[in-house]
Image: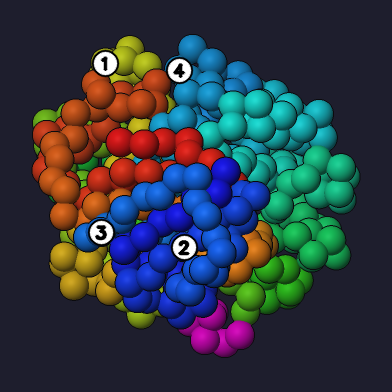
């Protein structure tokens, strides 16, 4: 199809473009942005007046339940939810079942996503076999044959520092980015909330800030020694941001992201055992939340992700410590992020960069921009449309969200993938 999008405010941070402009799409690619050729005849025209037109969002962390947890959702259901949230590319961690430590699992995920047709899906390969932290996975094979864009041990800490060093050396030799979840298992133990006044009042085992910061310090020392390109995932602590920002200043090849919920919630939102606020890493103090926001505003934190983890209803009904951590977050990623504009943390173009071009850069993808000739992955949203979060109406199979009844601003009206509509409001 030939499609034109007219009268919208086009924001393309990768190309420093922010103006009211028209876009022409032909054969799944951007034909023109700004000056549409006079001979162009569109099969369909979208009037985006008073709306924002930007690249499709890129999510650095989304669990799609398949393979291994199809009872809570599957690739088709979750990529459909991504399209409803304006997300056109998702990155899947390796902790599926079976784990992404063979090319067959990665190929299965890619095939299922392509068959569903709602979003691009890229995978991270396992850093160690079975994520056990004992033997290195075949990273080169996962990269070359399995199409993995990076490697990670997900939320399975590697206790042996020598093995972590060898893993970083191997990844560096392959030119692979290593995605790190900073956690010292000896310090986090069986904790389920931030260690502080709230955990004491509720009588819940706490996870101290040092469980993250000690791990960050170790990994930074190893990154400096090995020269590996590293990305820290879903940080939660002020001191973590400070240490990594210092490493960036010193020239280490490191970046970091934060989950959207960490920018709005604190441990106080746990209230009286609200299991919807059971997440890992845990919701921290207001000081930590403010530091994460400051890290975004000064560009130390490069990206915002959903950290999407859908669950069935039963997973959140047990006593707090026994519930499954995680939030169904694809459909709230954009509006929660837009709140940062209202709060003066980021300008709208800077925010869109942290949802599009910056995640693309971290993943090494030629996406997240609207350059002529690029794939027409586009999100169109109404920044003034108010709506109330009702998890039971989520497109995602997971209805677990702490944001029920929140009034948010910003609603996706159209999502295009390779020049085809995959969502319309």
| Residue highlighted by disc 2 | 23
Secondary element at tag 3: loop
Disc number lying in front (1 or 2): 2
Name the residue furthest front. Answer: 39
Q: Is residue 325 left or right of residue 1?
A: left
State how far apart marks 4 and 3 are (Cα): 38 Å
Earlier along the polypeptide chain: callout 2 or callout 3?
A: 2
Earlier along the polypeptide chain: callout 1 or callout 4?
A: 4
State how far apart marks 4 and 2 are (Cα): 38 Å
Earlier along the polypeptide chain: callout 4 or callout 3?
A: 3
Q: Position of residue 296 (x, y in %)?
A: 35, 70
| Residue highlighted by disc 1 | 317
Secondary element at tag 1: loop
Q: Are the residues at dot 3 and dot 1 in contact (C-beta closer than 8 Å)? A: no
Disc number lying in front (3 or 1): 3
Q: Position of residue 394 (x, y in %)?
A: 30, 27
| Residue highlighted by disc 3 | 49
Question: Can I make out residue 176 in this image?
Answer: yes
Quadrant for residue 141, please give it: top right
- The dominant secondary structure in magenta is helix
Q: Residues within 10 Å of mark 1 (few under 14, many from 20)?
A: some
Quadrant for residue 134, please give it: top right
**Residue at the image position 31 percent from the left and 45 percent from the top:** 412
Earlier along the polypeptide chain: callout 3 or callout 1?
A: 3
Q: Which residues are magenta?
A: 245-251
- Locate the N terminus and report the quarter of the image it occupies: top right
Q: Residues within 10 Å of mark 3 (few under 14, many from 20)?
A: some
State how far apart marks 1 and 4 are (Cα): 15 Å
């Amino acid at each position: 199809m030939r499609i034109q999008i007219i009268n919208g405010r086009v924001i393309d941070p990768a190309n420093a473009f922010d103006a009211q402009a028209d876009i022409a799409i032909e054969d799944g690619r951007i034909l023109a942005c700004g000056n549409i050729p006079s001979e162009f005849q569109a099969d369909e025209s979208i009037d985006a007046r008073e709306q924002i037109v930007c690249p499709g969002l890129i999510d650095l962390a989304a669990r799609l339940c398949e393979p291994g947890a199809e009872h809570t959702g599957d690739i088709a259901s979750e990529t459909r939810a991504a399209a409803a949230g304006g997300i056109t590319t998702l990155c899947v961690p390796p902790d599926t079942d079976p784990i992404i430590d063979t090319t067959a699992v990665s190929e299965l995920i890619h095939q299922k996503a392509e068959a569903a047709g709602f979003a691009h899906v890229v995978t991270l390969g396992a850093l160690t076999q079975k994520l056990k932290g004992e033997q290195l996975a075949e990273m080169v094979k996962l990269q070359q044959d399995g199409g993995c864009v990076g490697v990670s041990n997900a939320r399975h800490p590697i206790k042996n520092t020598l093995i972590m060093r060898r893993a970083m050396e191997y990844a560096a030799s392959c030119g692979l980015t290593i995605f790190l979840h900073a956690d010292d298992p000896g310090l986090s133990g069986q904790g389920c909330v931030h260690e502080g006044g709230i955990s004491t009042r509720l009588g819940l085992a706490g996870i101290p800030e040092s469980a993250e910061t000690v791990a960050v310090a170790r990994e930074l020392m190893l990154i400096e020694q090995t020269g590996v390109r590293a990305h820290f995932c879903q940080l939660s602590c002020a001191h973590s941001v400070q240490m990594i920002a210092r490493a960036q200043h010193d020239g280490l090849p490191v970046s970091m992201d934060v989950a959207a919920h960490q920018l709005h919630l604190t441990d106080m939102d746990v209230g009286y055992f609200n299991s919807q606020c059971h997440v890992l890493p845990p919701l921290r103090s207001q000081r930590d939340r403010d530091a994460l926001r400051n890290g975004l505003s000064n560009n130390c934190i490069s990206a915002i992700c959903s950290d999407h983890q859908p669950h069935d209803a039963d997973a959140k009904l047990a006593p707090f410590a026994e519930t499954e951590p995680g939030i169904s977050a694809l459909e709230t990623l954009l509006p929660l992020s837009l709140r940062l504009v209202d709060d003066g943390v980021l300008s709208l173009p800077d925010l869109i960069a942290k949802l599009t071009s910056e995640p693309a850069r971290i993943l090494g993808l030629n996406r997240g921009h609207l350059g002529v000739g690029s794939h027409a992955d586009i999100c169109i949203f109404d920044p003034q449309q108010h709506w109330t979060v009702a998890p039971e109406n989520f497109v995602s199979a997971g209805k677990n969200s702490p944001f029920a009844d929140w009034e948010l601003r910003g609603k996706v009206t159209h999502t295009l993938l390779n020049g085809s509509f995959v969502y319309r409001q």
